[in-house]
Image (cartoon, rainbow, N blue to C red):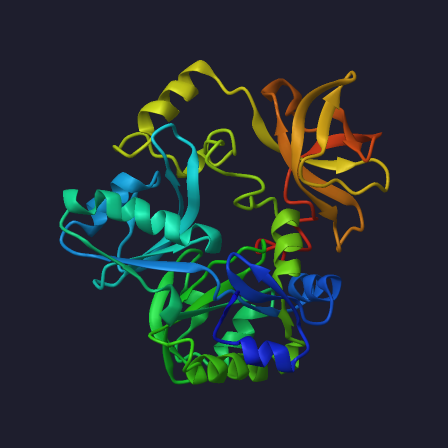
Amino acid sequence: MARKAHLHELHAAASAKMVEFAGGEMPLWVSSISEEHLAVRNGVGIFDVSHMGEIVVTGNEASRFLNYLSTNDVSKLGGCSGQYSTVCNHAGGIKDDVLIYSLEGRGYMVVTNAANTEKILGWFRSFQDEFDVEVEDATLSTAMFAVQGPKALETLQRIAPFDLQGLRRFGGKISFLSGQEVLLSRTGYTGEDGFEIYLMGVAIDEPGKAIDLWNAIIEAGKGFGIKPCGLGARDTLRLEAGLPLYGNDIGEDVTPLEARLDFVVKFEKDFVGKEALAAQKESGLESVRVGFELLDRAVPRHGNPILKDGKQVGRVTSGTVSPLSRKPIGMGYVPPRYSPVGTELEVEIRGSLHRMRVADWPFYDTARYGRNRAK
Protein backbone atom coordinates (compact mmCIF):
# COMPACT_ATOMS: atom_id res chain seq x y z
CA MET A 1 0.00 0.00 0.00
CA ALA A 2 1.37 3.42 -0.99
CA ARG A 3 2.36 5.76 1.83
CA LYS A 4 0.29 8.93 2.02
CA ALA A 5 2.31 12.12 2.45
CA HIS A 6 1.49 15.17 4.57
CA LEU A 7 -0.74 16.89 1.99
CA HIS A 8 -2.56 13.83 0.66
CA GLU A 9 -6.01 14.96 1.75
CA LEU A 10 -5.41 18.46 0.39
CA HIS A 11 -4.42 17.08 -3.03
CA ALA A 12 -7.40 14.72 -3.03
CA ALA A 13 -9.75 17.63 -2.29
CA ALA A 14 -8.26 19.49 -5.27
CA SER A 15 -9.04 16.46 -7.52
CA ALA A 16 -5.36 16.00 -8.33
CA LYS A 17 -4.43 12.93 -10.35
CA MET A 18 -2.64 10.78 -7.77
CA VAL A 19 -0.07 8.11 -8.64
CA GLU A 20 2.12 5.75 -6.67
CA PHE A 21 5.74 6.85 -6.84
CA ALA A 22 8.66 5.36 -4.89
CA GLY A 23 6.35 3.89 -2.28
CA GLY A 24 4.31 7.05 -1.78
CA GLU A 25 1.18 8.47 -3.33
CA MET A 26 1.85 11.84 -4.96
CA PRO A 27 0.06 14.18 -7.43
CA LEU A 28 0.97 13.63 -11.09
CA TRP A 29 -0.93 16.76 -12.09
CA VAL A 30 -3.57 19.08 -10.66
CA SER A 31 -4.81 20.97 -13.76
CA SER A 32 -2.63 19.58 -16.58
CA ILE A 33 1.07 18.91 -17.09
CA SER A 34 1.37 21.49 -19.87
CA GLU A 35 -0.48 24.21 -17.95
CA GLU A 36 1.59 23.66 -14.82
CA HIS A 37 4.84 23.54 -16.82
CA LEU A 38 4.11 26.88 -18.49
CA ALA A 39 3.07 28.46 -15.18
CA VAL A 40 6.57 27.72 -13.82
CA ARG A 41 8.33 28.99 -16.95
CA ASN A 42 6.28 32.21 -17.05
CA GLY A 43 5.21 32.89 -13.48
CA VAL A 44 5.30 30.63 -10.43
CA GLY A 45 4.32 27.13 -9.40
CA ILE A 46 4.43 25.19 -6.15
CA PHE A 47 5.28 21.50 -5.88
CA ASP A 48 4.74 19.13 -2.99
CA VAL A 49 7.93 17.07 -3.02
CA SER A 50 7.57 15.54 0.43
CA HIS A 51 8.31 12.13 -1.09
CA MET A 52 12.02 13.07 -1.20
CA GLY A 53 14.23 11.61 1.52
CA GLU A 54 16.01 13.54 4.27
CA ILE A 55 18.90 12.03 6.21
CA VAL A 56 20.41 14.05 9.06
CA VAL A 57 24.06 13.46 9.96
CA THR A 58 25.47 14.86 13.22
CA GLY A 59 28.57 14.32 15.33
CA ASN A 60 32.17 15.47 15.55
CA GLU A 61 33.14 13.87 12.25
CA ALA A 62 29.98 14.59 10.23
CA SER A 63 31.84 16.71 7.68
CA ARG A 64 34.63 14.15 7.21
CA PHE A 65 32.08 11.32 6.98
CA LEU A 66 30.05 13.00 4.23
CA ASN A 67 33.18 14.16 2.43
CA TYR A 68 34.28 10.53 2.16
CA LEU A 69 30.88 9.27 1.00
CA SER A 70 30.18 11.97 -1.60
CA THR A 71 32.15 13.27 -4.57
CA ASN A 72 31.81 17.02 -3.99
CA ASP A 73 33.76 18.83 -1.27
CA VAL A 74 31.61 19.04 1.85
CA SER A 75 34.37 20.90 3.68
CA LYS A 76 33.54 23.95 1.53
CA LEU A 77 30.08 24.22 3.10
CA GLY A 78 29.68 26.73 5.88
CA GLY A 79 26.92 28.41 7.82
CA CYS A 80 23.72 27.35 6.12
CA SER A 81 24.47 26.38 2.55
CA GLY A 82 24.04 23.48 0.16
CA GLN A 83 25.75 21.70 -2.70
CA TYR A 84 24.77 19.23 -5.38
CA SER A 85 26.74 15.99 -5.25
CA THR A 86 26.77 12.30 -6.05
CA VAL A 87 27.17 9.27 -3.81
CA CYS A 88 29.11 6.55 -5.63
CA ASN A 89 29.76 2.85 -5.18
CA HIS A 90 33.30 1.48 -5.20
CA ALA A 91 33.18 1.09 -9.01
CA GLY A 92 32.29 4.78 -9.45
CA GLY A 93 28.63 4.15 -10.31
CA ILE A 94 26.08 6.63 -8.99
CA LYS A 95 24.16 5.29 -6.00
CA ASP A 96 22.24 8.59 -5.90
CA ASP A 97 22.52 12.26 -6.77
CA VAL A 98 21.87 14.32 -3.67
CA LEU A 99 21.77 17.75 -2.10
CA ILE A 100 23.89 18.17 1.03
CA TYR A 101 23.16 21.05 3.40
CA SER A 102 25.16 22.44 6.28
CA LEU A 103 22.66 23.37 9.01
CA GLU A 104 24.36 26.26 10.83
CA GLY A 105 26.10 24.11 13.43
CA ARG A 106 23.23 21.60 13.70
CA GLY A 107 24.95 19.02 11.52
CA TYR A 108 24.13 18.21 7.90
CA MET A 109 21.09 17.12 5.94
CA VAL A 110 21.32 14.92 2.86
CA VAL A 111 18.33 15.05 0.50
CA THR A 112 17.94 11.85 -1.49
CA ASN A 113 15.72 10.73 -4.33
CA ALA A 114 12.61 9.08 -2.93
CA ALA A 115 13.38 5.62 -4.32
CA ASN A 116 16.91 5.70 -2.89
CA THR A 117 16.36 6.79 0.70
CA GLU A 118 16.59 3.32 2.25
CA LYS A 119 19.55 2.42 0.04
CA ILE A 120 21.53 5.54 0.97
CA LEU A 121 20.57 5.23 4.64
CA GLY A 122 21.90 1.66 4.66
CA TRP A 123 25.05 2.71 2.77
CA PHE A 124 25.76 5.50 5.25
CA ARG A 125 25.17 3.22 8.23
CA SER A 126 27.56 0.63 6.81
CA PHE A 127 30.36 3.21 7.31
CA GLN A 128 28.99 4.74 10.53
CA ASP A 129 31.20 2.76 12.93
CA GLU A 130 34.33 4.17 11.28
CA PHE A 131 33.39 7.76 12.21
CA ASP A 132 32.09 9.68 15.21
CA VAL A 133 28.66 10.36 13.70
CA GLU A 134 24.97 9.74 14.14
CA VAL A 135 22.77 9.04 11.11
CA GLU A 136 19.02 9.66 11.37
CA ASP A 137 16.23 9.22 8.83
CA ALA A 138 14.06 12.36 9.05
CA THR A 139 11.97 11.66 5.94
CA LEU A 140 8.63 10.91 7.56
CA SER A 141 8.81 13.99 9.79
CA THR A 142 9.77 16.43 7.02
CA ALA A 143 7.47 18.16 4.56
CA MET A 144 9.20 19.59 1.49
CA PHE A 145 7.83 22.12 -0.99
CA ALA A 146 9.41 23.71 -4.07
CA VAL A 147 8.35 27.18 -5.24
CA GLN A 148 9.73 27.73 -8.73
CA GLY A 149 9.56 30.32 -11.50
CA PRO A 150 10.44 33.96 -12.23
CA LYS A 151 7.84 35.10 -9.66
CA ALA A 152 8.96 32.67 -6.94
CA LEU A 153 11.01 35.26 -5.06
CA GLU A 154 8.23 37.85 -5.08
CA THR A 155 5.76 35.23 -3.89
CA LEU A 156 7.79 34.08 -0.91
CA GLN A 157 8.97 37.60 -0.05
CA ARG A 158 5.40 38.34 1.01
CA ILE A 159 5.66 35.86 3.88
CA ALA A 160 9.43 35.98 4.61
CA PRO A 161 10.93 38.20 7.35
CA PHE A 162 14.22 38.86 5.50
CA ASP A 163 15.38 39.97 2.05
CA LEU A 164 15.35 36.85 -0.13
CA GLN A 165 17.32 38.59 -2.87
CA GLY A 166 20.43 38.26 -0.71
CA LEU A 167 20.17 34.47 -0.74
CA ARG A 168 22.54 33.24 -3.45
CA ARG A 169 22.12 30.13 -5.58
CA PHE A 170 22.53 27.09 -3.28
CA GLY A 171 22.48 29.44 -0.31
CA GLY A 172 20.29 28.48 2.61
CA LYS A 173 18.80 29.99 5.73
CA ILE A 174 16.99 28.64 8.76
CA SER A 175 14.29 31.22 9.27
CA PHE A 176 10.53 31.62 9.27
CA LEU A 177 7.87 31.60 6.56
CA SER A 178 4.41 32.63 7.62
CA GLY A 179 5.55 32.21 11.22
CA GLN A 180 6.88 28.65 10.84
CA GLU A 181 10.55 27.72 11.16
CA VAL A 182 11.92 26.23 7.95
CA LEU A 183 15.13 25.57 6.09
CA LEU A 184 14.86 27.69 2.96
CA SER A 185 17.32 27.12 0.11
CA ARG A 186 17.62 28.79 -3.27
CA THR A 187 17.58 25.56 -5.24
CA GLY A 188 15.23 23.61 -7.48
CA TYR A 189 14.83 21.06 -10.24
CA THR A 190 13.23 23.13 -13.01
CA GLY A 191 15.94 25.36 -14.48
CA GLU A 192 14.13 28.37 -13.05
CA ASP A 193 14.93 30.57 -10.08
CA GLY A 194 13.18 29.33 -7.00
CA PHE A 195 13.33 27.92 -3.53
CA GLU A 196 13.00 24.61 -1.75
CA ILE A 197 11.41 24.66 1.68
CA TYR A 198 11.93 22.05 4.41
CA LEU A 199 9.47 22.02 7.29
CA MET A 200 10.91 19.61 9.84
CA GLY A 201 9.42 17.93 12.88
CA VAL A 202 5.97 17.51 11.32
CA ALA A 203 4.46 14.03 11.60
CA ILE A 204 2.47 12.71 8.62
CA ASP A 205 -0.52 11.99 10.86
CA GLU A 206 -0.42 15.57 12.21
CA PRO A 207 0.02 17.59 9.00
CA GLY A 208 -1.60 20.83 10.17
CA LYS A 209 1.58 22.95 10.00
CA ALA A 210 2.40 21.67 6.52
CA ILE A 211 -1.12 22.42 5.26
CA ASP A 212 -1.03 25.90 6.82
CA LEU A 213 2.29 26.72 5.16
CA TRP A 214 1.15 25.41 1.76
CA ASN A 215 -2.00 27.52 1.95
CA ALA A 216 -0.01 30.59 3.01
CA ILE A 217 2.25 30.23 -0.04
CA ILE A 218 -0.77 29.78 -2.33
CA GLU A 219 -2.31 32.94 -0.90
CA ALA A 220 0.96 34.88 -1.29
CA GLY A 221 1.22 33.85 -4.94
CA LYS A 222 -2.35 34.55 -6.01
CA GLY A 223 -1.41 37.87 -7.56
CA PHE A 224 1.20 36.11 -9.68
CA GLY A 225 -1.07 33.31 -10.88
CA ILE A 226 0.56 30.60 -8.77
CA LYS A 227 -0.42 27.04 -9.67
CA PRO A 228 -0.05 23.83 -7.67
CA CYS A 229 2.04 21.45 -9.81
CA GLY A 230 2.54 17.71 -9.91
CA LEU A 231 5.34 15.31 -10.70
CA GLY A 232 4.47 15.34 -14.41
CA ALA A 233 5.43 19.00 -14.85
CA ARG A 234 8.44 18.51 -12.59
CA ASP A 235 9.66 15.85 -15.04
CA THR A 236 9.11 17.88 -18.22
CA LEU A 237 10.68 20.97 -16.64
CA ARG A 238 13.82 19.14 -15.51
CA LEU A 239 14.20 17.49 -18.93
CA GLU A 240 13.82 20.84 -20.70
CA ALA A 241 16.57 22.15 -18.40
CA GLY A 242 18.82 19.15 -19.14
CA LEU A 243 18.78 17.80 -15.59
CA PRO A 244 19.14 14.02 -15.11
CA LEU A 245 16.55 11.81 -13.39
CA TYR A 246 17.80 8.97 -11.23
CA GLY A 247 16.62 5.61 -12.53
CA ASN A 248 16.26 6.98 -16.07
CA ASP A 249 19.38 8.96 -16.93
CA ILE A 250 21.71 7.95 -14.11
CA GLY A 251 22.15 4.89 -11.91
CA GLU A 252 24.72 2.54 -10.46
CA ASP A 253 25.79 1.51 -13.97
CA VAL A 254 26.65 5.12 -14.88
CA THR A 255 29.47 7.25 -13.49
CA PRO A 256 29.35 11.02 -12.86
CA LEU A 257 31.90 11.45 -15.66
CA GLU A 258 29.71 9.65 -18.19
CA ALA A 259 26.69 11.64 -16.99
CA ARG A 260 28.57 14.94 -17.49
CA LEU A 261 28.40 15.63 -13.77
CA ASP A 262 32.17 15.88 -13.45
CA PHE A 263 31.79 19.36 -11.91
CA VAL A 264 30.78 17.65 -8.64
CA VAL A 265 33.76 15.26 -8.63
CA LYS A 266 36.67 16.67 -6.62
CA PHE A 267 39.70 14.48 -7.23
CA GLU A 268 41.85 16.46 -4.80
CA LYS A 269 40.17 14.69 -1.85
CA ASP A 270 39.54 11.06 -0.94
CA PHE A 271 36.10 9.53 -1.49
CA VAL A 272 34.45 6.20 -2.23
CA GLY A 273 34.80 5.46 -5.94
CA LYS A 274 37.72 7.85 -6.53
CA GLU A 275 40.14 5.18 -7.76
CA ALA A 276 37.66 3.86 -10.32
CA LEU A 277 36.75 7.34 -11.55
CA ALA A 278 40.39 8.37 -11.82
CA ALA A 279 41.07 5.28 -13.92
CA GLN A 280 38.10 6.02 -16.16
CA LYS A 281 39.23 9.61 -16.60
CA GLU A 282 42.68 8.39 -17.57
CA SER A 283 41.49 5.72 -20.02
CA GLY A 284 38.69 7.78 -21.57
CA LEU A 285 34.91 7.43 -21.64
CA GLU A 286 33.03 4.93 -23.75
CA SER A 287 29.73 6.82 -23.58
CA VAL A 288 28.46 10.22 -22.47
CA ARG A 289 25.09 11.79 -21.77
CA VAL A 290 23.83 14.09 -24.52
CA GLY A 291 20.72 16.07 -25.30
CA PHE A 292 18.94 15.84 -28.64
CA GLU A 293 16.02 17.13 -30.67
CA LEU A 294 14.03 15.03 -33.13
CA LEU A 295 13.62 16.44 -36.62
CA ASP A 296 10.03 15.18 -36.97
CA ARG A 297 7.01 14.77 -34.70
CA ALA A 298 7.73 11.37 -33.14
CA VAL A 299 8.11 11.17 -29.35
CA PRO A 300 11.30 9.55 -27.98
CA ARG A 301 11.00 7.36 -24.89
CA HIS A 302 13.30 5.68 -22.38
CA GLY A 303 14.99 2.66 -23.92
CA ASN A 304 14.67 3.63 -27.60
CA PRO A 305 17.83 2.65 -29.54
CA ILE A 306 20.02 5.40 -31.01
CA LEU A 307 21.63 4.46 -34.33
CA LYS A 308 24.34 5.66 -36.71
CA ASP A 309 24.45 4.25 -40.24
CA GLY A 310 22.02 1.52 -39.26
CA LYS A 311 24.00 0.32 -36.20
CA GLN A 312 22.97 0.93 -32.62
CA VAL A 313 25.42 3.24 -30.88
CA GLY A 314 23.42 4.34 -27.84
CA ARG A 315 20.07 4.56 -26.12
CA VAL A 316 17.50 7.13 -25.12
CA THR A 317 17.11 7.59 -21.37
CA SER A 318 14.45 10.35 -21.28
CA GLY A 319 12.17 11.92 -23.88
CA THR A 320 9.09 14.09 -24.21
CA VAL A 321 7.51 16.85 -26.25
CA SER A 322 8.57 20.18 -24.77
CA PRO A 323 5.45 22.03 -23.54
CA LEU A 324 7.31 25.27 -24.27
CA SER A 325 8.57 24.71 -27.84
CA ARG A 326 6.27 21.79 -28.78
CA LYS A 327 9.35 20.02 -30.15
CA PRO A 328 10.34 16.42 -29.30
CA ILE A 329 13.40 16.50 -27.04
CA GLY A 330 15.35 14.00 -25.01
CA MET A 331 18.62 12.80 -23.61
CA GLY A 332 20.58 9.61 -23.85
CA TYR A 333 24.04 8.06 -24.05
CA VAL A 334 26.31 7.77 -27.10
CA PRO A 335 30.07 7.32 -27.67
CA PRO A 336 31.96 10.62 -27.31
CA ARG A 337 32.66 10.82 -31.05
CA TYR A 338 28.91 11.26 -31.64
CA SER A 339 28.42 13.81 -28.85
CA PRO A 340 29.30 17.14 -30.53
CA VAL A 341 26.32 19.47 -30.89
CA GLY A 342 24.85 19.22 -34.37
CA THR A 343 25.74 15.55 -34.93
CA GLU A 344 22.90 13.81 -36.77
CA LEU A 345 21.84 10.34 -35.66
CA GLU A 346 18.67 8.25 -35.76
CA VAL A 347 16.37 6.92 -33.08
CA GLU A 348 14.19 3.86 -33.46
CA ILE A 349 10.64 4.39 -32.20
CA ARG A 350 8.11 1.58 -32.56
CA GLY A 351 10.07 0.00 -35.36
CA SER A 352 10.56 3.19 -37.40
CA LEU A 353 13.71 5.31 -37.72
CA HIS A 354 13.54 9.04 -37.04
CA ARG A 355 16.26 11.63 -37.57
CA MET A 356 17.64 13.37 -34.49
CA ARG A 357 20.28 16.00 -33.89
CA VAL A 358 22.50 16.31 -30.81
CA ALA A 359 21.67 19.56 -29.01
CA ASP A 360 22.98 21.17 -25.87
CA TRP A 361 20.73 21.83 -22.92
CA PRO A 362 18.77 23.71 -21.71
CA PHE A 363 16.21 23.28 -24.49
CA TYR A 364 14.98 26.87 -24.34
CA ASP A 365 16.10 30.41 -25.09
CA THR A 366 18.09 31.35 -21.98
CA ALA A 367 17.52 35.05 -22.65
CA ARG A 368 13.77 34.50 -22.15
CA TYR A 369 13.56 31.56 -19.76
CA GLY A 370 15.47 30.03 -16.86
CA ARG A 371 17.08 31.51 -13.79
CA ASN A 372 19.62 33.51 -15.84
CA ARG A 373 17.06 35.11 -18.15
CA ALA A 374 17.45 38.75 -19.08
CA LYS A 375 15.76 40.92 -16.46
Above or below residue 145? Residue 258 is: above
Left or right: 176, with 301 as reference point: left
Q: Residue at x 56, y 80 (%)?
A: 9
| Rendered location of residue 286, percent (x, y) | 54, 19
The quadrant the C terminus occupies is bottom right
Q: Position of residue 320 (x, y in %)?
A: 73, 47
- Tell me which residue sits at (22%, 45%) in the image: 65
Q: Using the rendered view, name the quadrant where residue 373 is placed.
A: bottom right
* Above or below for 332 versus 224: above
Res 341 → quadrant: top right
Number of numbered discs visible in the structure rendering: 0
Instruction: Please indicate whether residue 30 sits to the left or right of residue 155 in the image.
Output: right
Front position in the image: 78 or 317:
317
Note whether 49 is above or below 299 in the view shown: below
Spot the residue most to the front: 1
Examine the rendered structure and indicate whether residue 75 appears above or below residue 305: below
Classify residue 318 by image quadrant. top right
Residue drawn at x 60%, y 64% is 149
Q: Is residue 84 visible?
A: yes
Residue that appears at 22% across and 49% down:
63
Note whether residue 343 is visible.
no
Residue 374 location, x and y as percent? Answer: 63, 56
Find residue 285 and report its horizontal and vertical position in percent. Answer: 51, 20
